[in-house]
Image: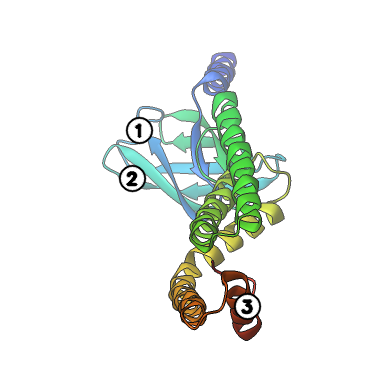
Amino acid sequence: MQHKVFLMMFVILIIGSVAAQDYYPQGSGVDLRISCDLVNCSDGNVNITVLNPNNTLLVDNQTTTKYNEYILYNLNLVTAGSYSSFLASDNDYATYDFVVTESGVEITEASSKLTIGLLAILVLLLFASLFVMFKVENYIVKFTFYWLSHILLILVTFTGWQVGVEGLLIGTAITGIFRILFWILVVAVIPMVLLSMTWIFYIHLYNENIEKLMEKGEDPETAFALTKKKYGGWFSGR
C-alpha cells in the first residue's frame, strides 16, 4: 500500500512537470490563481509550499484562500524564473509550476524578434529624422521633424522598456532607464508645446523684420543678415 502511495505521488509530479505553465508578473503582492481542477479544494482546506527558481524555500506549508472554483495565495515574486509548488488538501495532492517574468507574459521567439525588429526600425527612423532636422534650413521643415523626432524618441524608449520587460535586455537597470526616459519625454510634451508656440512667435517676428527691411529698400541678403544679427539663434527662418 505504501509503495502505491509513493508511486501515485511520483506520477503526480511527472504530470505536473509537463503540464502547461502559468505566467505571473514580477513584483510584490502577486496572487497565484490555481484551478480546483488541479487539486480537490471542495473543503477549502488547501496548503501550499513554494520553491524559488534556485530551489530555496519561499513559502512553507501555508493556507490558501478558496474563491469560487479557484484557490488563491498572495506572495512576493521578486525574482524572474521558473517556480515550483506543492499543493496538499485533506484528500488530494498536486504540483503547480509557474513562470515569473517582468511583464507576466510568455516570451516566444517570434514575439522577441518582432519587438527587437520594431525597436531597430524606430531607431533608424529617429536618426533619419534628426539628420533631416539639422540639415534643412526651412524652419517649417525643422519644426515638423523636431516633433517627429520627439514622437519617435517616445516610441523608442517605450519599445526599449517593453523589450526589457520581456526579459530580452540583460539587467533590469537598462529597463529602468528606458522607463524613466519614456515618462520624462511624455511629461515634457506639455512644456514643449508651449516652447513650440514661443518659437513660432519668434519666427514670425524674425520674418516680419526681414520683410520690413526689404520694404525699406534693403536687398534680401542684407535684410536676412541684419535680422540674423538682431535675433540670432539656431532656429533661423527664411
Q: Image height check: is 195 above or below 133?
A: below
- Residue 172 location in percent, x, y? 68, 52
Query: Which quadrant holds the N terminus?
Result: top right
Q: Which mark is residue 36?
A: 1
* Label 2 or label 1, whichever comes before in sequence order: 1
Q: Which residue is mark 3?
A: 228
- Confirm or deny contact between disc 2 and disc 3 (CB under 8 A): no
* Label 2 or label 3, whichever comes before in sequence order: 2
Which of the two discs, 2 and 3, sits closer to the camera?
Answer: 3
* Label 1 or label 3, whichever comes before in sequence order: 1
Label 3 neighbour load within 10 Å: few <14, some 14-19, many 20+: some
- Residue 224 location in percent, x, y? 59, 74
Under circle 3, the secondary element is helix
- Residue 42 location in percent, x, y? 30, 36
- Confirm or deny contact between disc 2 and disc 1 (CB under 8 A): yes
32 displayed left or right of 41 = right
Residues at marks 2 and 3, CA–CA distance in whole angstroms: 75 Å
- Observer-nearest of 62 and 157: 157
Give the farthest residue toward the left.
68
- Observer-nearest of 228 and 124: 228
Query: Which quadrant holds the C terminus?
Result: bottom right
Tell me where residue 166 sits by quadrant: top right
Q: Which mark is residue 73?
A: none
- What amino acid is labelled 1 in the image? Cys
- Residue 196 location in percent, x, y? 47, 71
Which of the two discs, 1 and 3, sits closer to the camera?
Answer: 3
Q: Which mark is residue 66?
A: 2
- What amino acid is labelled 3 in the image? Lys
- Observer-nearest of 35 and 203: 203
Residues at marks 1 and 3, CA–CA distance in whole angstroms: 76 Å
- Confirm or deny contact between disc 1 and disc 3 (CB under 8 A): no
